[in-house]
Image (tube, helix red, strand yellow):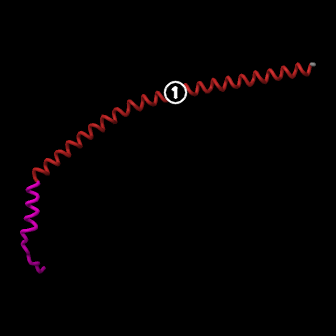
Amino acid sequence: MAEREASKIVQKARELRTKRVREARDEAKKEIDAYRKAKEEEFKKFEAEHTKGNKQAEDEANKEADGKIKEIQASGKKNQADVVADLLRGVLDVKPVPPSAE
């Protein structure tokens, strides 16, 4: 009879310990999830703040590059006739020069 009582007490202690371990594990999971969520939100906020500056710098660089490209194209169109004429003159107006005896 005493053995049965002792066995019941041991069984209850095991069940209680198992229950406490499960509760502790569940609580730890909740804390980890909450921490992870907080850190993800913090990272998203950080990322949003810092990508704004990069986006603005990128937009400014693109605008500046577009301006330079348009300027180069305009200059090319303006001087295109002169460049073609110079090239044609250099190819068609051949002036042979005898080699010098040095």
> What is the x, y in percent for residue 58?
30, 38
Where 81 falls versus 51 (above or below)?
below
Residue segment shown in magenta? 80-102
| Few, some or many residues within 10 Å of mark 1 (<14, 14–19, 20+) | few
Number of marks in picture = 1
Indicate the quadrant where residue 101 lies: bottom left
Residue 86, given in percent of the width and then of the height, sits at 9, 61
Q: Is residue 70 left or right of residue 30?
A: left
Task: Indicate the amino acid at tag 1.
Answer: Lys
Residue matched to label 1: 37
Residue 85: x and y in percent read 8, 60
Q: Residue furthest right?
A: 1
- In the visual, does 35 lie left or right of 56? right
Magenta region includes residue 97: yes
- At 34% from the left and 36% from the top, the residue drawn is 54
Q: Residue at x 88, y 21 (%)?
A: 6
Q: Nearer the viewer, residue 57 or 87?
A: 87
| In the rendered image, the vertical position of residue 47 relative to residue 96, given as above or below | above
Q: Quadrant of residue 90?
A: bottom left
Question: What residue lies at 6% left-to-right and 72% top-to-bottom?
Answer: 95
Q: Quadrant of the N terminus?
A: top right
Tell me if 86 is positioned left or right of 72 in this view.
left
For the C terminus, the quadrant is: bottom left
Q: Is residue 4 above or below residue 40?
A: above
Residue at (62% x, 26% y) in the render: 28
Magenta residue check for 23 = no
Picture coordinates of residue 9 (x, y %)? 84, 20
